[in-house]
Image (cartoon, rainbow, N blue to C red):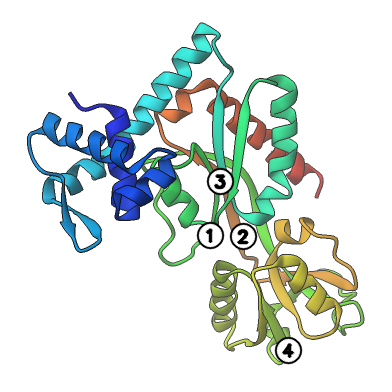
Amino acid sequence: MIEARHLRVLRAVASTGSFSAAGRELGCTQPAVSQQMKALESSVGTPLLVRTGREMRLTQAGEALVRHAAGIIAGLTAAEEEVAAIAGLRAGRVRLVSFPSGSSTLVPTALAALRAAHPGTRVFLEEAEPPNSVELLREGDCDVALAFRYEGAAGAEEWDDLVVRPLLTDRLVALVPDGHRLARTEGSVAIGELAQESWIAGCPRCRGQLVEVCEGAGFSPRIDFATDDYPAVVGLVGAGLGVAVLPQLAVESVRPRGVRTVALEPTVRREIVALTLPDLAQVPAVAATLDELARAGARQSAAR
């Protein structure tokens, strides 16, 4: 019989490459890791690891078991959480991963409401941009992932294997210095009107989207500065060092000073969603988190 604790140890060894590193990650000793791996190999009747120098390498059987481990562990977690909630032993635990602008806008509102309604529910928050956040979810390392994808973008992510909860639609806006010639423009501005400007680029995905939109308008942006930090983007624009294009939610996540937002043509939107695995969607704490995130998204949309 394969035990879930053995699968967790196998995944840790596979990801870290050694028993000692896996022990540090799991909070146990190297001999305990070695003992549990021997028990797992005994259960399946075949070697799962081979030592190559100082590291461990998975055998073909080990690779197959690791592939299935995430789904098995997610299913067991779902069962444990649901049974515990039904039995009244605990309210639940949710591991949430969000991209930065979601963490500072949607997440605080949702988690405050969740705590008020379910004070026993514990939420652990980490930050990661998609597609990394989505991979963390698929690998069983989180329960809910906030993610986004741009409408019509080439190679848009496939989420058919996940439960998708739409939160809101976000659009790209231009940021220009307060004294810019377009700062007080009413209505939309064609992005081509900014073709000769210096540009400040945001996160890698936003940067890629900027280049794609600009090239669609017939020019390549001259990017003088690039930073993943949204307040830094706003600060650079406010200092007159260039213009930028950011998702509206990113602008709302900071206090823009010395800048103006301008609507763009063509309109570029991104869909912001909360994702989870089908098994986890049945867990009360996860379902409640999804509900509060959806309400937070609706409030954010209504406030615009």
Which residue in the structure is indicated by mark 4?
197
Determine the secondary structure under disc 4: loop
Q: Is residue 182 above or below residue 56?
A: below
Q: Distance between the residues labelled 2 and 4?
A: 22 Å
Q: Can residue 287 be seen in this view?
A: yes
Which residue in the structure is indicated by mark 3?
97
Residue at (54% x, 80% y) in the render: 216
Q: Quadrant of residue 190?
A: bottom right
* Classed neighbour count for the residue bearing mark 3: other residues with Cα under 10 Å, few (<14), some (14–19), many (≥20): many
Determine the secondary structure under disc 2: strand
Give the amino acid at mark 3.
Val
**Residue lying farthest to the left in this orientation:** 45
Which residue in the structure is indicated by mark 1?
151
Residues tagged 1 and 2 counted as in contact (Cβ below 8 A): yes
Left or right: 243, with 52 as reference point: right
Give the amino acid at mark 1.
Glu
Q: Of callouts 1 and 4, which one flags the residue occurring earlier in the amino acid sequence? A: 1
Q: How far apart are marks 3 and 2 (CA)?
A: 22 Å
* Classed neighbour count for the residue bearing mark 2: other residues with Cα under 10 Å, few (<14), some (14–19), many (≥20): some
**Residue lying farthest to the bottom in this orientation:** 196
Marks 3, 1: nearer the viewer: 3
Which residue in the structure is indicated by mark 2?
269
The percent position of residue 91, horizontal first and vertical second, equals 59, 18
Q: Of callouts 1 and 2, which one flags the residue occurring earlier in the amino acid sequence? A: 1
Give the amino acid at mark 2.
Arg
Q: Distance between the residues labelled 1 and 2?
A: 6 Å
